[in-house]
Image: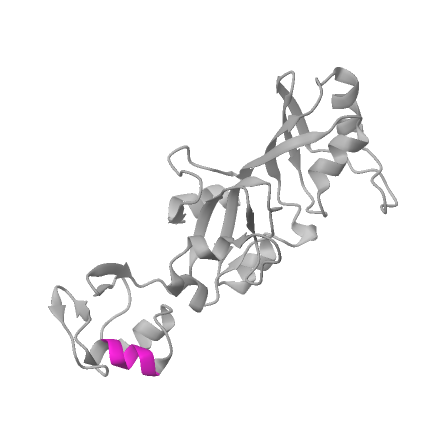
Amino acid sequence: MDLESILFRQGFGSRRQCRSLIAEGRVAVGGSVCADANEDFPPDDLTFDVDGTPWRYRERAYLMLNKPAGYECSRDPQHHLSVFGLLPAQLATRGVQCVGRLDEDTTGLLLLSDDGQFVHAYTSPKRKVPKTYLATTRHALDERQLQALTDGVLLHGEKAPIAAAAVRMRDETQLEITVNEGRYHQVKRMIAAAGNRCDALHRERIGGLALPGTLTPGTWQWLDDEALRALRA
């Protein structure tokens, strides 16, 4: 694949912008500056530098973000900052999108990708991908509330009760809850329907993939093969 196409596919701008980067001597491959936009390189396992910053070629982008509060999962945010501002510009340019959304005040594990099939697979209601949250409640939890969430609660606008896939108290105001759907404000509404109020919500897990403790709020990382296998587990 020629160097111009490599940069273009990785989100370094339009083809004209990529040619300019190369012509200006700002791109290096294997430690050597390459000024020929038409020079071919095998993209598999290719790492190149732009302005001294290394970048590994990836045909598709799969990443996780530890979303902080105060960010919207939108390219056109209405009231808060966009989560895309936490990513390198190249990822937004190549069309990375959120795999589902978290409310602006909800924190934790957020997946992003430019693979449409991947996005659909983990947002389709038919797949019933489990998502585990840690909810901090306004009032002390009790067995009646846990039972209601397990049996199913009727949410406004829904025709049938919705049950949590699993619930567990961590302490009197800390609830671990797993759901298989992704309805609007679902966990918060379920807790309200059970007779309590959710003051904070943090997503810890999607499928078999847990948010790493080393990933601090506002930071992101690529999903490696091991993480992708865990997600599918």
Residue placed farthest to the left in the image? 32
Task: Give x and y (percent) for residue 110.
Answer: 52, 47
When the figure is inspected, residue 50 is found, relative to residue 173, above or below; the finding is below
Instruction: Tell me the residue at 76%/28% (across/down).
Output: 149
Q: Is residue 8 left or right of residue 210?
A: left
Instruction: Tell me the residue at 60%/52% (across/down).
Output: 100
Task: Give x and y (percent) for residue 220.
Answer: 41, 47
Q: Is residue 103 left or right of residue 43?
A: right
- Quarter in which the N terminus is drawn: bottom left
When the figure is inspected, residue 23 is found, relative to residue 233, above or below; the finding is below
Residue 121 versus residue 154: which sits nearer the camera? 154
Q: Is residue 39 within the magenta segment? A: no
When the figure is inspected, residue 35 is found, relative to residue 208, above or below; the finding is below
Residue placed farthest to the right in the image? 159
Q: Predominant secondary structure in magenta?
A: helix
Task: Give x and y (percent) for residue 178.
Answer: 64, 34
Quarter of image, res 6:
bottom left
Q: Which residues are magenta?
A: 16-21
Residue 226 appears in the rendering: yes
Instruction: Tell me the residue at 44%/44% (across/down).
Output: 218
